[in-house]
Structures are given as structure tokens and as C-alpha cells.
Amino acid sequence: MFRIPKHIGVIPDGNRRWARKNGLKKEEGYAHGLQPGLRLMQAAREQGVEELTYYGFTVDNCKRPRVQVGAFSEACVQAAKMLEKEDVELYVLGNSQSSCFPKELVPYTHRNGFGGHKNGRMRVNLLVNYGWEWDMKNDWVSREIPRVDMVIRWGGMCRLSGFLPIQTVYSDFCIREELWPDFKEEQFEEALQWYQRQDVTLGG
């Protein structure tokens, strides 16, 4: 009945704004985005989405105060541990040679011949300490990640922030005003409804 996007990109923005809104320190917002990420993955899998790519944090994000860098780095480590318990194939992509890259995530930086959806398992990519310039200067490290059909960004900002620039050349870009920690499954369902109304021609 629905035209389900095979690959969805997720930009989970608004963690710091959510923390301020709820009387917390900015760095405390990241941990509150973990359960939403898990619930979104489960909802996408139920809908038949084959691949999901989350934007963890960028090279530029590492310019923020140290306490915030530590908080979103730890959130990415915890996200990987949570996803590892699910029946998915997890791949972490980013500059693992940098001190900003959590060493706990190094074991996830190889595809190891994953079969992906051909084996009935969703592929989940987590961009950690990722930068589009780093990607391009290193002979397109993200080449194993396929084209993204739709990008959903929470937090109301209308920009890609360097999210997989090659894979998103023909992506439909859905903006959600809600802050990421306020994610509800209905928001994802509405994004899929929105996708039905897009004229996907890929330039043809």
C-alpha cells in the first residue's frame, strides 16, 4: 500500500534545546535521545525499511565544550550497545583515527561482508565523528552506504549539516519541528505519509 523508502537518514537534532527547556544542563539532553533512537529503529523495521543511518556527531561538533563532547560521545557508545542487542547489522562510520572517536566503537567500523536486508536483517549505520570533508579526502569512505531515499531531521532546522552529501543528492528532506527527545512513533508515521506525496523521479 505504501511506497516505503529503502534507506532513511535520521538527523536527531534538538537535544541541547530540549535540556534547557526541561531545566537541565545542555549536556544532559543527549542521554534522553537514546530511547527515541531505539524506538524509531523498531518502528522503521516494522514498516520494512531496509537501512537506517543515524547522525551521531560530526567532526565540527567536537569544537563544543569538553563536557558536551564527552556526553554525546558516551551517548553514541550507549546507542551502539543498545542496537547490538537488536537483530540488526550495525556499522559505525567516522574518523576513528581522531581522539574524538570513542575507542569502544572501533569494533563496529568494519562491514565484515554483511548481507544486510538480503538476510532479512536491517542495516543500521551510525555516523560518529563524521565529516563530509574527511569522507571526500579519504576517497569516499562512505562508499559502502547506499543512496538515501529520505532524510528526516528533528528540531526544525532546514539543513543537512554535512550528512552524507553523495548519498543524499536525490533525497527527500522531511523536517520535524519537534525536538528529538520528544520523538513519538506517530511522527515517523507522518513522515512516511509525507513521503508518499513526493514526486520521486531521480531526475528522470
Image (cartoon, rainbow, N blue to C red):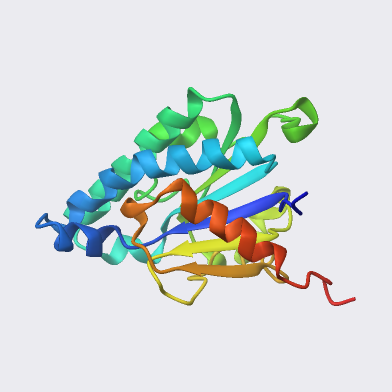
x then y, percent, for residue 175: 50, 69
* Left or right placement of residue 22 versus residue 176 in this view: left
Establish if 117 lies above or below 12. above
- The quadrant the C terminus occupies is bottom right
Relative image position of residue 70 (x, y in whole percent)? 24, 48
> From the viewer's perspective, is residue 56 above or below residue 45?
below
Residue furthest right as drawn: 204
Query: In front here: 137 or 18?
Result: 18
The percent position of residue 183, horizontal first and vertical second, equals: 39, 51
Q: Say left or right for 52 vs 50.
A: left
Question: Where does residue 15 sit, x and y in percent of width and height?
Answer: 29, 57
For residue 96, above or below residue 197 = above
Residue 102 visible in the shown view: no
In the image, 164: left or right of 120? left
Q: Quadrant of residue 163?
A: bottom right
Residue at horizontal 79%, vertical 69%?
A: 200
Query: Considering depth in this image, is 45 or 134 the residue closer to the camera?
Result: 45
Residue in the image at 48% along x and 64% along y? 153
| Residue for point 67% across, 59% down | 140
Q: Quadrant of residue 113?
A: top right
Residue with the most extreme front position: 1
Q: 120 left or right of 192? A: right
Residue 30 visible in the current orientation? yes
Question: Looking at the image, which is closer to me, 60 or 189?
Answer: 189
Q: Say how many tags the image has.
A: 0
Residue plotted at (59% across, 70% down): 173
